[in-house]
Amino acid sequence: MKINIEVCLDKEMEVLIKGNPSSSEVTTFINYVNEFGLETGPNKIILRSGEKDFIKNIEDIWYFEGQGNKVRAIIDEAHYTCKYKLYELESFDDKGYVRVSKGLIVNVNKIDFIEIEFSGNYVITLKNGHRLTLSRKYVKAFKQYVEEVL
Amino acid sequence: MMNRIRTYAITGLGIGFIVTNIMLYFFMYGEGLSYNGQELIKCYILWAVASVFFGLASFVYDLLNIGPVYKTFIHFLLIATISFMTTSIMLKGVLGLQVNLMRDVFPSFLLSFIGIYTVLWIGFYFIERARLNKLNVKFK
């Protein structure tokens, strides 16, 4: 196995694996990298985009979105697949994540403001301009969380 | 579930006590009705029963999985219907008055209720907006 190291001092560490994803060698290495990411970085999360796995800072994620059985993590304009279920991600409440609807968990640090429409619907606007619906069911818990955490 | 039904019914009774007084006062001074002691007691009992239903009507906000505007509209329909029926029983059944409910009572009732709900909704909207503005400071 060849190891290439590209020096990028100002960038987050990135691991690129070139090989057959179904081979035991690659699988073992991915598992090793995954464990490395989880064990050495409690604020890191492994996300997948296409065929690549990325280790990302949890606080960089804008929100998690449940779509059927899959959970997507949104960072800026990029979408990643996350191996966790939404209910598991609720445990990230200590990192600023709060559930705002059945299918959404939002990073409160990425929220610009929240408003109520005259129809009574609550809308969360993120700092990048994305608008998300805050379900009425979660309004009370959301407000309480923001009061306590921010 | 039973606990919630009881809570709503008791809350309805509490709020209903105020509503009863307002309604009886309105009918006495606004519409020029007079009651003897027995009629007054019957009217109080009638409005107390209606108040339990007023309270139970609030279940709409808990049970239905629809938007707040629709919930409020259904609540409006329920409350207006209960109030209209109670008023009808009071005027015709208890006080024995010969009134045309649809012509003399219903239009003013409908207008009053639309007015009340509009004011309540606007009030709720601006109060909630002010609360959210306070909360928004935390996001800055």
Image (spheres, coloured by chain):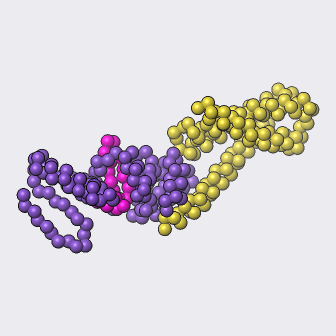
Chain colours: A purple, B yellow
Q: Give the range drawn in magenta.
A: A56-75
Q: Residue at x 71, y 33 (%)?
A: B52
| Residue B59 location, quadrant | top right
**In front here: A148 or A143?**
A148
Residue positioned 59% across, 41% down in the render: B61
Q: Is residue B49 left or right of residue A93?
A: right
Q: Main secondary structure of the magenta part?
A: strand
The single residue placed furthest to the bottom in the displayed view is: A9
Q: Is residue B18 visible?
A: yes
User: Residue B51 is drawn in which quadrant?
Assistant: top right
Q: What residue is drawn where x is 78% and y is 39%?
A: B17
Q: Is residue A41 magenta?
A: no
Q: Report if residue A63 lies within the magenta region.
A: yes
Residue A51's place in the image compared with B138, above or below, is above
| Residue occupying the far front of the picture | A39
Q: Where is residue B23 in the image (x, y as percent from the top left)?
A: 80, 40
Q: Where is residue A45 in the image (x, y as percent from the top left)?
A: 30, 56
Can residue B81 be seen at all in this image of the molecule? Answer: no
Q: Total marks drawn?
A: 0
Left/right placement of residue B71 relative to residue B33 reads left
Vertical placement of residue B30 versus A4, above or below: above
Residue most toward the right? B36
Quarter of the figure with the N terminus of chain A:
bottom left
Residue in view at x 63 percent, y 53 percent: B124
Residue B7 placement (x, y as % from top left): 66, 36
Judged left or right of residue B20, residue A13 is left
The percent coordinates of residue A32 (x first, y second) are: 19, 53
